[in-house]
Structure formats: C-alpha cells, structure tokens
Image (spheres, rainbow, N blue to C red):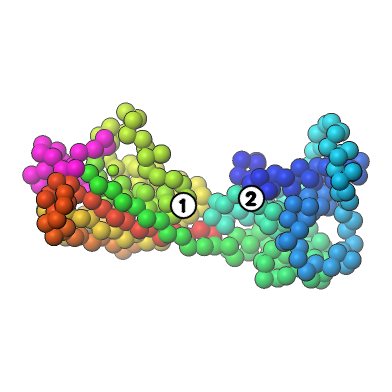
Amino acid sequence: MFENFSEEAKRCIFMARLAAITEKSKTIALPHLLTGIRKENAGIFRGVDWQKITLKLARLSPENLKSASQMAGDVPLDAKAKKALLAAHEIAKKAGGEPVGAAHLLAAVLSVDAKLRKQMQKAGMAKERGVAKSSAREKGAAMAVSRSGIGYDLHRLAENRKLMLGGIEVPFEKGTVGHSDGDVLCHAICDALLGAASLGDIGTHFPDSDPKWRGVSSLVFLRQVRQYLERKNLKIAHIDAVVVAERPKLGPHFPGMRAEIAKSLGVAPEQVNLKAKTNEGLGELGRGEAVAAHAIATIQSGS
Ligand code: MG
C-alpha cells in the first residue's frame, strides 16, 4: 500500500505510530494519524483554533518521542485508519498519480470522519486549501491539472531502409537507421508524453540495448506509453508535432499517420496535429542525411 507514499507521508505514519505508543494504544487510530500529520506538516493546519477541536491529540514532546521510539513492537492500524490510508492513495492517484503527501493524508482522514471534518471547518481550517471540506472525490477533481511535455528525435537516413513515420511506411529512396523501426515522429511523441507524465524518457523504457525492441514497430511504444499514462489516471488532451525532412513531401501522408498514432493512443485523430518543415537545405537535415521530429503533448490528470 505504501509504494506511492512520499517520505513526508511515511514520516506522518511513523509519528502516528509513536503517538499510539505514547498513549499505550493497541492500534493506530485517526487521532494518531492527525497527530502525525500535524507533527510533520503543521503548515497545512494554519488558521485552525485547536481549542475548538474536542478530539484529544497525543502530545509528542521530545521525551515522549524518544521513549516511544525505543519501544519495540509494531502497532497495527485500526479499521478507520486503514480506510484513511487507502483513501489517501486514491486522492493522490486522482490528482495525477503524485506521491501521497501530508495534505492527501489529511484530506483522507477528514473524508472518513465527517464529525472531525465539521469540527476542523468550524475551527477555521481554510476552505481554499481544498483539504478540510473536500470529500475524497471532490479533492481529486479539485487537484486536476494540465501538464505538457516536449519530445525530440533524429535518425540518420540510409539506403535500403524503410522510411517509417507516424506508424506508416512513406515511399522514399532512403529510410531511417535505428534499433527499432526508427520512427522519429513516434519517438518524439513518446518522449513528449513521458515528459508530461514525469515518467522519464523513451531510452529508459525501451532501451536500444534490449534485443526485444529490435525492428519493432514504434506504434508498440506508443501503446505501451498509453498504458503507463492510464495507470496514472492521466488522459491525453492533445499532441502537436513537426517533422523536419528535406524530402519527401509528407503532407499527403499525414491523414494516415494521424489515424495510426490516434488509434495507438486511444484518442481521436483531431487530437493529433502534424506539421512538416524542410531545413532550407541547411545542415544534415537540409542535405537529406537525416530526419527529425519535435512533439509537444498536453495531458490532464484527475477525473
Ligand atoms: Mg529514436
């Protein structure tokens, strides 16, 4: 359950455990979690008048912390605390797969205890933080964001090779040299999507040292990246790309490319825009020794 928990969230739970030990409780309950969150990130409670909170929080003085941390033995979570941690996981997932932090934990604790939520609101918890008032679902939606990523790729052109671009073969006297099918457009789009999702780059996921990817269609990479995004609840909003090639003319092939790219990514062709440029005869691209592509992807998180 904790694989997506940030160090901050883990420390909150650790502190909650110490709070339970200090109170000689056999389980970690919601008040202990709240104590742990407050200990780790007091800032998210700014404005709260604790006098108005009837819930008694454990006192984590340095002495208490020291003696509690010296006590052996694990303290399990009670049913509500378990529910809260699962809810925190969901809240962070809906917010774009970001690691669970103290704010997610607080939102989760308050989502499983309506009474405490009301108390926190009455005690002055700032509504604009979207933490105290929100249910887990509302919280996820409130944190929906749009992100962009950029991608670039270049492959050399050589004779006796196929020119694969955007998942289709473009008839030409030369083709790209590459470990996979050398599809610069698909590669640039993959990198743009991975960038937007903060998932690194194409080389990390599909290394050219892996024989598995030799000669493979780059549409396979797009389909795989789509799965990575889906796992993080990220939706593709739009892709725009420029292919730089002196020759051949690419415009007539764009409808086919857009259809293949869109199908692989599970979006409409209208969400994939393609443009072509020459390099005005300059450099390697201009001399027809290589073809390159730039792409930008916009994705959305949340519900
Ligand atoms: Mg490449």
Q: Is residue 160 magenta?
A: yes
Q: Which mark is residue 100?
A: 2
* Mark 1 nearby-residue class (10 Å; few <14, some 14–19, many ≥20): many
Depth order, front residue of 226/37 = 37
Left or right position of 172 against 92? left
174 to the left or right of 46: left
Q: Quadrant holding ligand 1?
A: top left
Residue 269 point in image, percent of width and height: 30, 60
Task: Name the residue type under label 2.
Answer: Val
Quarter of the image where the N terminus is located: top right
Magenta residues, start to end? 156-181
Rendered residue at 31%/51% (across/down)? 152
Front-most of 236 and 100? 100
Q: Is residue 76 magenta?
A: no
**Which label sits on residue 176?**
none
Instruction: Estimate the x, y position of residue 204 in percent, counting from the top left.
Output: 41, 39
The image shows a total of numbered marks equal to 2
Residue 65: x %, y % from top left: 85, 43
Three-letter residue code for mark 1: Ala
On residue 197, the disc is 1
Residue 154 place in picture, x, y as percent:
25, 47
Give the farthest residue toward the left.
173
